[in-house]
Image (cartoon, rainbow, N blue to C red):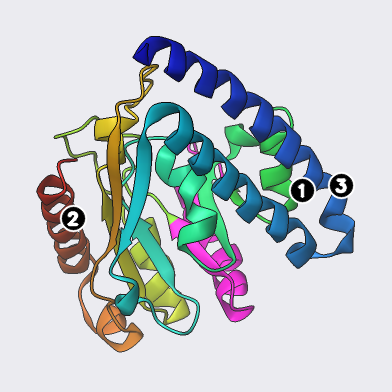
Amino acid sequence: MLLIRSALFNVCFMVLTALFSLLIILFRPFGFSASWVWAKMWSHTVFLLLRLLCGIRIVIEGREHMPDHACVVVAKHQSAAETVAMPILVPPYTWILKRELFNIPFFGWALALMGTIGIRRGSPREAIRQVITDGTAMLAQQRWVVIFPEGTRAAVGTTGNYQPGGIILAQKAKSGILPMAHNAGALWPKRGFIKTPGIITFRFLPYIPAEQVVAMKRNELLERLKTDIEAATRALGG
């Protein structure tokens, strides 16, 4: 039965993603806000379907740590779930991700039109320059910036190679950092077909103010983020 429910969800998920991506594209000429409405609705619809078909619901913790202004969100990456959830977790934002995702029909096109920062992994220096330039511009417009420092999804119980891109951006733009942990991979695994019933908890950790971000050494801050995010992730079962 779980196999059938997961299969039905996966089919519906692909259809809904294509449909809402098309709506985002069609409404983009009317402004970012017009498209953002559909992005949030996509997120809500997918998680409603996930609860009804697969018995998975979400809990959001640590909202009290969220600042009242745009910042850099540094998040654990285990699953597709945190990607889908982001529009209902964070105010209007832009992602930093690999440029190849723009090639995905509808979904990738929608990402590109929404101002997503797509970097070329083969050129680290160019990628960092782009992150700083485009990310600073977005933060100045009060658009939050979301980055997965591991770059790719890490299996449950494992730690990817944390990269300093988000920290470099935050220090250059004099922005604060909001860390986020979760256990999504335990229920919606990396490349996993079966979705296991349970609760996905998204937990925001204490906000690091801009003054502290700028004052800390890059490696020291990266190690702190890695330690805190990984510890919280393990505590949640991720």
Q: What element does badge 3 sit on?
A: helix
Mark 2: amino acid = Lys
In the rendered image, which residue does mark 1 sit on? Answer: 24
Q: Is residue 50 left or right of residue 206?
A: right
Point 89% across, 58% down: residue: 29
Q: Which residues are magenta?
A: 119-146
In the rendered image, which residue does mark 2 sit on? Answer: 226
The secondary structure that dominates the magenta segment is: helix
Measured in 3D between alpha carbons, the distance from the residue under mark 1 to the one under mark 2, in whole angstroms, is: 34 Å
Q: What element does badge 2 sit on?
A: helix
Neighbour tally class for label 1: few under 14, some 14-19, many 20 plus, Cα within 10 Å: many
Measured in 3D between alpha carbons, the distance from the residue under mark 3 to the one under mark 1, in whole angstroms, is: 6 Å
Point 46% across, 27% down: residue: 53
Q: What element does badge 1 sit on?
A: helix
Point 51% across, 58% down: residue: 88
* 1 or 2: tag closer to the N-terminus: 1
Provide residue 141's location: percent of width, then percent of height.
64, 78
Viewer-nearest residue: 103 or 185: 185
Q: Quadrant of residue 176?
A: bottom left
Point 31% across, 43% down: residue: 150
Please report contact status of discs 3 and 1: CB closer than 8 Å, yes or no: yes
Answer yes or no: is residue 152 visible: no
Q: Quadrant of residue 2?
A: top left
| Labelled disc at residue 26 | 3
* 2 or 3: tag closer to the N-terminus: 3
Q: Is residue 223 left or right of residue 210?
A: left
Q: Which quadrant is home to the N terminus?
A: top left
Compared to residue 164, the image places residue 91 above or below, namely below
Please report contact status of discs 1 and 2: CB closer than 8 Å, yes or no: no
Residue with the most extreme bottom position = 211
